[in-house]
Image (cartoon, rainbow, N blue to C red):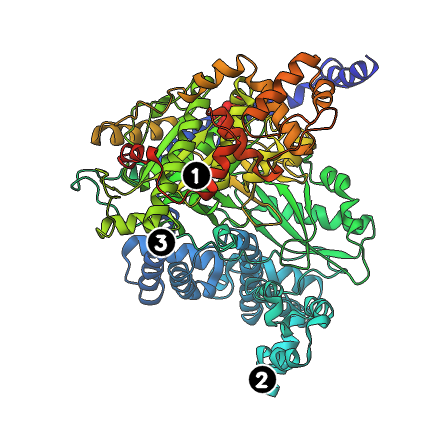
Amino acid sequence: MATATRTRAPARKPAAGRRTPGYLVPFALLGRALAAIWRALAAMLGSLARAVGRNAATARDLEAEHRRDGLALGVLAVGLISVMAMWFAAAGPLGRGLTSLCRLLAGNGALLLPVVLLASGAHLLRQAPEPGSRGRLVVGTTAVTLSVLGLFDLWAGSPGSSHGRDHAGGLIGALAAQPLASGLSAAIAVPLLLIVGAFGILVVTATPISAIAGYVRELVTGRSSDAAADDEADFVEQPVQPKARRRLRRAPADSDLTETTDLSELSDLDEPTADLDEPLPRPRKPRKPKIVEDDLPPINAPLQLELSNGGGLYTLPSLATLAQGAPHMEHTRANDEVIASLTQVFTEFDVDCAVTGFNRGPTVTRYEVELGPGVKVERITNLTRNIAYAVKSADVRILSPIPGKSAVGVEIPNADPEIVMLGDVLRSSVAQRDHHPMLVALGKDVEGGFVVANLTKMPHLLVAGATGAGKSSCINTLILSILTRATPEQVRMVLVDPKRVEFAAYQGIPHLVTPVITNPKKAADALQWVVREMDMRYEDMEHSGTRHIDDFNKKVVNGELVAPPGSERVYSAYPYLLVIVDELADLMMVAPRDVEDAIVRITQLARAAGIHLVIATQRPSVDVVTGLIKANVPSRLGFKTSSVTDSRVILDQPGSEKLLGKGDALFLPMGASKPARMQGAFVTDVEIRSIVEHCKGQLQPSYREDVTAPAVAKKEIDEDIGDDLDLFLSAVELVVSTQFGSTSMLQRKLRVGFAKAGRLMDLMESRSIVGPSEGSKAREVLVMPDELAGLLYALRNGGSADDLVAADEDEEPDEDSEEGAETGAL
Ligand SMILES: Nc1ncnc2c1ncn2[C@@H]1O[C@H](COP(=O)(O)OP(=O)(O)OP(=O)(O)O)[C@@H](O)[C@H]1O
């Protein structure tokens, strides 16, 4: 209240207390009239500018290259006009007007204008603009201009007349030189202006004075700094690297050691990189986009051979259907501000370290911080909160070290993020180079490089994150990647969508084996079908003596496969089968054991059979992503999670709780120890609709009826076990994993009565899991723990432990292999 009274009082006083004296009234009226005219003019100009701005939106839509070319050609055109006007006085009345204006402002300096314009135009044509260097160029050019024109003015004796100034340094020259000459003296003004000019040249060329010494030394000795560094490198052994690096940071002119490529890039900017006594380090030139796919461990999965596409009738959708995103910015003013804030924090807390570069990604920028000798990494990690405070963002993530570098990474969200469009990733050279049908677009990494991944190399992927974090968008991009790159003959899909709305758009695409499954119970049955399909494929591979479905397909195409005697089987090539489950939690609620067993079995074996799983969940808790599932799904994509515990479940380490949401993700491909941060690609509903329409217009889906049919064998087991299947399986798991066939243990652990525990034990005996009763002693357990997953699967399908043995020993084709004829026609 008190504050409100204090602020209001002074505002009222002048109005009430101050009266304009009578003799000033005409002036006051005139002032008000002028002010009103000024406001009206400003409003008119404003609306004019807004109208122009609206119409200029289409110009902004032009690609950056075209805008730059247009600007360069425009500057060249003005340069040519100025040549004709100023050097040859042959540009008509407009040229004469231009010459007079330039002479008025710059005097004889106007004669240099054509040279400056032509050189600038040529430079713009040859080189991409660096938005970050604009401020530098403006300051440098202004300093050079003032210096040159001021010197012209002094040279002509600082003429007082307008005509005299037109042939000296013009108005600008007079303004630059005459105050100095009259305030000090012409003898002092000349060197001062020379210093200003030299400063301008250094700023324009981004050359620090300290680097000049290096250049002079090079000129004198005749040796390049590279050669000098190479010489030094011969003496620098591996363990000495950190020392060498520190030195490089202090003396960039000498730097270019191969081991320190990143740091030597810093010296490309011709300015010493941040040292402790420097206020602001120069950002490092962004490196060429790096492809995370290259980081994947090498897996020698053979490529799927080119399959015919049903007489060439099927054409893939054009990538032009997918929208283009905004061009990637490698450096913006926001980055400079963050560097200044970081440097200030380090100075305030007296930590001997400096920001030596950064890589700007679409949503976050990773700043590289190098430590001085003897500085603990913890000193930076302990400053996380202070850094967050200084850069005004709670989502600061510290990476120690940046993989492959002796530097700490500080990842800070961009104040001006970019959306990564799927079309851009699919059109990128990294995606275009590789024609594998299972290659999918993921997004962009922190360095702005496109990230793609081959699903066959994953070979199974777990996608997890809180609601709204970007999972569904990511899965949409995976599906669209496949639709734009693979025919239904190459890749078939099973889409499971218990949420009912996520995959509705894909209903009816020819790549589907069965309509999109929304019923969790049916989804569990579909997973059982996938297991059967996998078994069929394995049998076929076994008979054909091949180890991977690609080799099998190759033999089919070459006509090298002959059906077993007595079989009417006609072999055909198998497509890859991609199973995508959008919400695992819903499936685990309905049939946890069935689902877990099927997933474990598929993930353990399906890679060679060309079957790959993508499982998404927003509840990455241990009851959904069980230990068994986790152990068998090696590649992970973690979007923002609500807790560090969830992050640990997905990635086995914290980190995803600090992500920003909306597609910000950590990608941990199989075999990688550290996850890579990336921004997921995005695709709009309109794009999805048009690609789906294209696919549906090409071919009708041919669905398999048996995919969601419940397993027939189950009924048989039900008669014997009744409704106790789950309890029976728990008992089997307990007995086999502990290798202890005791009825009283079952009573205790399963909380069942003696009669029930005894019956469960008898059922186990009838299925060759345990031996006969030995009185009060525990029964012998006949199945080893490592056979448990297979046993549970067999029991679920009406089998017994004998089937495990039969599967191991039986080399002959199974009777059921005829079923494969149907599978092969998938
Ligand atoms: N890669 C992305 N780039 C930009 N925005 C994105 C991206 N991914 C998601 N978003 C934004 O976040 C919103 C939520 O994304 P999405 O529906 O994919 O989340 P989700 O994790 O699937 O959530 P839920 O589990 O509730 O379905 C989207 O509507 C979109 O606006």
Measured as percent of width and height from the top left, residue 726 is found at: 57, 19
The mark that comes first in sequence, 3 or 1, is 3
The answer to whether one can see residue 419 in this image is no
Q: Which residue is mark 2?
A: 223
Q: Report if residue 152 is visible in the image.
A: yes
Report the residue that reaches farthest toward the front: 775
CB of residue at label 1: within 8 Å of ligand 1? no
Query: Do residues under tags 2 and 1 come within 8 Å of each other at their CB atoms?
Result: no
- Position of 248 compared to 606: left or right? right
Q: Is residue 746 positioned above or below 393 on the image? A: above
Asked if disc 3 and disc 1 are in contact, CB closer than 8 Å, the reply is no
Residue 599's mark? none
Q: Which residue is mark 3?
A: 433
* Vertical placement of residue 524 versus 534, above or below: above
Instruction: Report the amino acid beneath label 2.
Output: Arg
Mark 3 vs mark 2: in front = 3
Q: Label 1 is placed on what type of residue?
A: His
As rendered, which of 291 and 752 lies closer to the eye? Answer: 752
Q: Which comes sooner in the sequence, label 3 or label 2?
A: 2
Q: Quadrant of the C terminus?
A: top left
Is 638 situated left or right of 710 in this image? right
Instruction: Indicate which label's residue lies in the foreground, 2 or 1.
Output: 1
Label 3 is placed on what type of residue? Arg
Q: Which residue is mark 1?
A: 612
